[in-house]
Image: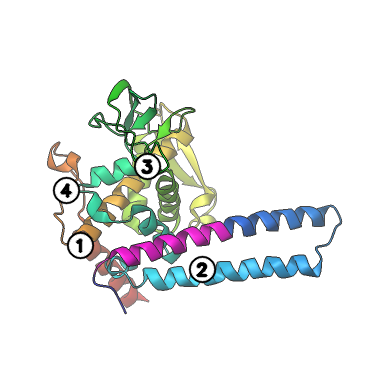
Amino acid sequence: FKEKIMDSMLREDINFINKFLYSVQKHRIMLSNWMDAKKRDGIESTPRQILLYEALEKQENIAKKMARDIVEMTPIWAEFFENTKGVAECLATSLLAEIGDIKRFGTVSKLWAYAGLLGGYYLASCENGHKLILSSDHHKTCPVFSNENDEPCSGLIKIDEHIEGQSPKRKKGYHFLFNGNLKTICWKVAEQMRKQGDDYYKKIYYGELEKQGYVRTLKSKKEETDPDKYEYTALPHAKIPKMHAMNRANRKVMKRFLSHLWEAWTALEGGDVRPPYVIEKLGHQGYVKWADLKQQIAETREKIKKVS
């Protein structure tokens, strides 16, 4: 059955299953690497060691199945994830777990900020000595949990520096007030969308790459369907290294994907769906709303189905 809304119990289950899955997966990979290293040194794993490894592998598979089952119970799965290519159940579970309650984000810009996908950030400090990396200068009091009761510090904040044109990064001695896990997951999503996603997101990626001065060319005709087999040629107007250009293209895909996820999810929860700030206030053109994109994807799939 499918839940009508993402209530607190369902969100808590998704969060727990996600943490369990990645915890087990992390230890399974560590053990696998250790056993492989032993084998390279000519030392075979004992039956007990193999049994314990297989038990961990079994737990991982159970968690994956549970992740698939629970995410398919959510309304956002049927509305959004089933209508896009590239993001399967486990990755979708991770997204839902890290975002939590979509009603916390009144605009998509707040979701972008939470994921650390803004083009700038602030270095700040509070009167009690905490150093902070913030998404905006609107913070007045320090949110860092500073005691055993998980109560915020609440010291007055002073902005020390505004870093423009760069995404926020962790800095020694500073509290990173973004969701680093969500940012990592978004990078994985962008990579999947580039390789397996709908043409809309691929066009965003390669369009931004060309804007930054790079075009893709095939190594051979046989490799046309594999995005990793392309070469990237610099154009005369290229001013930044290729990897920086690819990162910018990935970031644009991530932000557009999160915009559509936010639109679909907010509408399901009965919230006010507003266009992004750059569209609503700055008048940028070319943005496709989720409802329109959903229709375009459905029409494309129907054409492919008829041809095949």
Which residue corresponds to mark 2? 63
Q: Which mark is residue 307?
A: none
Looking at the rendered image, the disc whose residue lies closer to the viewer, 1 or 4, is 1
Upstream in sequence: badge 2 or badge 3: 2
Identity of the residue furthest to the right in this view: 42
Q: Is there a contact, CB below 8 Å, between mark 1 and mark 4? A: no
Disc 4, SS: loop
Disc 2, SS: helix
Q: Provide the residue span drawn in magenta.
A: 5-24
Q: Is there a contact, CB below 8 Å, between mark 2 and mark 3? A: no
Q: Which mark is residue 275?
A: 4
The residues bearing labels 2 and 3 have C-alpha atoms spaced at a distance of: 30 Å
Question: In which quarter of the view is residue 308 placed?
Answer: bottom left
Upstream in sequence: badge 3 or badge 1: 3
The residues bearing labels 4 and 2 have C-alpha atoms spaced at a distance of: 36 Å
- Prevalent SS, magenta region: helix
Residue in the foreground of this view, choosing between 290 and 64? 64
Estimate the x, y position of residue 280 in percent, counting from the top left: 13, 42
Residue type, label 1: Glu
The residues bearing labels 3 and 4 have C-alpha atoms spaced at a distance of: 18 Å
Estimate the x, y position of residue 248 in percent, counting from the top left: 38, 38
Question: In which quarter of the view is residue 83 placed?
Answer: bottom left
The residues bearing labels 3 and 1 have C-alpha atoms spaced at a distance of: 26 Å
Which residue corresponds to mark 3? 251
> Which residue corresponds to the image point at 38% horizontal and 43% vertical from the top-left?
150
Estimate the x, y position of residue 32 in percent, counting from the top left: 69, 58
The residues bearing labels 1 and 2 have C-alpha atoms spaced at a distance of: 27 Å
Upstream in sequence: badge 3 or badge 4: 3
